[in-house]
Image (spheres, rainbow, N blue to C red):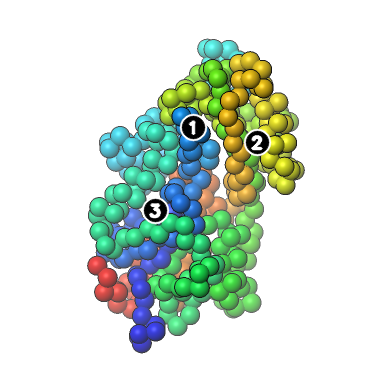
Amino acid sequence: MTSEQAAHVDVVVVGAGIAGLSAARELIAAGLSVLMLDKGRGLGGRMATRRLGRAVCDHGAQFFTVRGRAFGGIVAAAHEDDAVVEWCRGFTRDGSLGRDGGNVTAGHPRWRGRQGMTDLPKWVAARLADEAGSRFEIRRASRVTSVAADRGLVTLGFENGQGVTARGGILTPPPPQSLDLLAAGGLTAAAGEPVAAACEMLARVAYDPCFALMLVLDKPSRVPPPGGIQFDPNAGGPLAWIGDNQQKGISPMPAVTIHADGAFSRRHFETPPEEVMAMLIDHARPWIDGDPAIAVIEKSLQRWKFALPTELITEPLVAVSHAPPLACCGDAFAGPRVEGAASSGLAAGRWLVRALERGSPRTGSG
């Protein structure tokens, strides 16, 4: 390679959610250097926790489950380090106000972070930093604007005009966002195979948006134990979930998180936030103890544009390019939610390790 073509790092990973961090585990274990980029200031993507004064609210994913061995190993190690704990074995499903919990479905454990859902991705990132040292770096508040694959390298562009090159790359944003990055880098359906086939697969993915309304209350909510209601999606109401963050064990004061369903969120996505909050509070009145005008002492609304995949890709990853290796993965691949995203990331990491082993020598970093 010439100096202009030298890779800065072995692999660049876009997105510091559980998919990207899981991919990085495989890459680091193989001795590769990894640069992780995220447009946000925190870690975890939709495994998100926010403070409202003294209250703490999970406002993205509310819990996670474990079905497979690979993700189970990660969770078991995090549990041993007290980063995650079991919340419960099921939630009320009928909106019952009965303090006996109503129709609680018993089953497999629902897990949460010790202090919030961000605890698991933070734990994974800390373990990677300890293991890899200088071979692993996370750059936050880094907004990637383009991704290109040319002359054996993956090249990323940024808002400030700077760029990063790597021997391989993994994209974990929702596929509509990844497609925008690829198009900005000249990788479109018109670029020929395998790019065309990859772009066509990515374009099939669809998402429901979701409003997440966080309310700090002057007294405990009326949400029945163990602190969550999963509403029947066929019931016709706009609510999909109400979670009591105090019962959950992460908030020192009463606070609830309300998720709107996909239909309501699509219909009102551009509606002024105050109007959306008023409508959702009105529908949640039965689970607020007292007049909401008095009982709600603080509120905040989060709009998740790509919340729940409704059209999935059946494979765990999509290879956009083989030379250089560039793949997309995340919660829209082979199974949604936290474990699906983690499993997809692990698969993408293993794929990239194999691809680089067949390619050029590693960089000198680390």
Which residue occupies the foreground of this view, 151 or 316?
151
Q: Which residue is mark 2?
A: 260
| Mark 1 to mark 2 CA distance (whole Å) | 23 Å
Q: Is residue 311 left or right of residue 91?
A: right
Q: Which residue is mark 1?
A: 53
Q: Nearer the viewer, mark 1 or mark 3?
A: 1
- Where does residue 144 sit, x and y in percent of width and height? 51, 65
Asked if the residues shown at circle 1 and circle 2 are in contact, with their CB atoms under 8 angstroms apart, the answer is no
Q: Earlier in the sequence, mark 1 or mark 3?
A: 3
Which residue occupies the foreground of this view, 307 or 159?
159
Which residue occupies the foreground of this view, 72 or 144?
144
- Disc number at residue 21? 3
Picture residue at 61% right of the left edge, 24% below the top = 296
Q: Is residue 197 visible?
A: no
Type of the residue with mark 3:
Leu
Picture residue at 29% right of the left edge, 77% below the top = 361
- CA neighbours of label 2 inside 10 A, class few (<14), some (14 to 19), many (20+): many
Query: Is the residue 99 above or below the residue 15 in the image?
Result: above
Q: Earlier in the sequence, mark 1 or mark 2?
A: 1
Asked if the residues shown at circle 1 and circle 3 are in contact, with their CB atoms under 8 angstroms apart, the answer is no
- Disc number at residue 279? none
Instruction: Write down the quadrant of residue 325 in the picture.
Output: bottom left
Type of the residue with mark 1:
Gly
| Mark 1 to mark 3 CA distance (whole Å) | 29 Å
Q: Nearer the viewer, mark 1 or mark 2?
A: 1
Q: How many marks?
A: 3
Q: Earlier in the sequence, mark 3 or mark 2?
A: 3
Quadrant the C terminus occupies: bottom left
Picture residue at 27% right of the left edge, 70% below the top = 365
- Where does residue 339 sit, x and y in percent of width and height? 45, 44
